[in-house]
Structure formats: structure tokens, C-alpha cells
């Protein structure tokens, strides 16, 4: 008579232990990947522990998916800052200290470089 039931003794203990270790290694690799993804999003890597809580893990997945991440908020701030720098400081005022480049770094400096006792501006009205 042919018996179709599975007998674990035919597998051998080594095969079961090997498959278990392989499964554990794969699980650890994915856990580390989840921690890296959550950290790159700007959250603490400890949030990965929420995946072990039933039902809450699905809710948190949806919150993480649709909420603005801290890294996105920081990127928006940096982009607005960069746009302000590219536009420049605005119209320059012409006066004694702002006459030749407004004293901006990298721009032309007033006569004497703004140093007391330096050469005077010959075009300055007194």
C-alpha cells in the first residue's frame, strides 16, 4: 500500500535547519532594508517594530504612504531658500555705503573696501 503522507524524517534534520536559517537570513535582510527606507524618509528606524502589531501595521503603512515625509518638508524648504538666493537680494539702494555693489560679498566694494581711513570716493557728495 502506498502512503502519500509526508514524513519529516525523510527530509532530515539538516535540511530543516538549513531552510530555517535561510528563511531567517532573508527575514533579517528585509528588516534591515525596511529600517533603511524608513530612516531615509526622515523617520526613526524604530518605526519598523510597528509591523509586528496586527492591524496597526496596515494603518501605519497607509499613514507613511500618504503623509508628507520629513525629508520632503526639508527639501521644500531648501528649494524655496535656493529660489530666494537665485532671485537675488532685490533692488539695491544707492547711497554712500551701497554705491558700488552694495557691499555684497563677491561684488565690487566701495572705495577703500569699506575700511576706515581708506581712499575716499571722489564722486561722493558732501
Image (cartoon, helix red, strand yellow):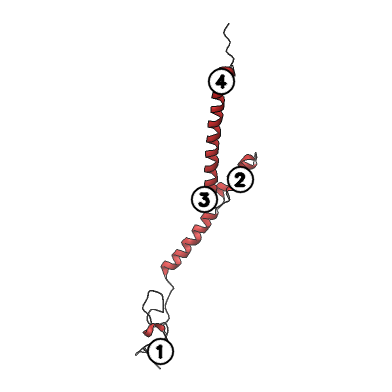
- Could you give the CA–CA distance between mark 4 and mark 3, rounded to whole angstroms? 43 Å
Give me the residue at 53% from left, 57% from top: 73
- Give coordinates of residue 49: x percent, y percent: 62, 43
Label 1: state its secondary structure.
loop
Q: Which mark is residue 40?
A: 3
Q: Which residue is mark 1?
A: 117
Residue 44: percent from left, percent from top: 58, 50
Mark nearer the N terminus (1 vs 4): 4
Residue hosting label 2: 60
Whole-angstrom CA distance, mark 4 to mark 2, is: 41 Å
Helix, strand or loop status at disc 3: helix
Q: CA distance from mark 2 to mark 3?
A: 17 Å
**Foreground: disc 2 or disc 3:** 3
Taking the spot 55% from the left edge, 38% from the top edge, the residue there is 28
In space, the residues marked 3 and 1 are separated at their CA atoms by 54 Å
Secondary structure of the residue carrying numbered label 2: helix
Q: Residues within 10 Å of mark 1 (few under 14, many from 20)?
A: few
Residue occupied by mark 4: 12
Q: Position of residue 26 (x, y in %)?
A: 52, 35
Between discs 2 and 3, the one toward the N terminus: 3
Amino acid at each position: 500500500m502506498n502512503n502519500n503522507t509526508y514524513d519529516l524524517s525523510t527530509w532530515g534534520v539538516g535540511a530543516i535547519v538549513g531552510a530555517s536559517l535561510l528563511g531567517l537570513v532573508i527575514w533579517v535582510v528585509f528588516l534591515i532594508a525596511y529600517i533603511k527606507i524608513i530612516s531615509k524618509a526622515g523617520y526613526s528606524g524604530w518605526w519598523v517594530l510597528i509591523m509586528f502589531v496586527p492591524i496597526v501595521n496596515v494603518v501605519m503603512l497607509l499613514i507613511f504612504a500618504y503623509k508628507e515625509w520629513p525629508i520632503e518638508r526639508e527639501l521644500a524648504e531648501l528649494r524655496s531658500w535656493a529660489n530666494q538666493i537665485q532671485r537675488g537680494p532685490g533692488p539695491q539702494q544707492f547711497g554712500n555705503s551701497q554705491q558700488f555693489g552694495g557691499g555684497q560679498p563677491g561684488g565690487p566694494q566701495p572705495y577703500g573696501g569699506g575700511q576706515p581711513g581708506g581712499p575716499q570716493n571722489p564722486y561722493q557728495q558732501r
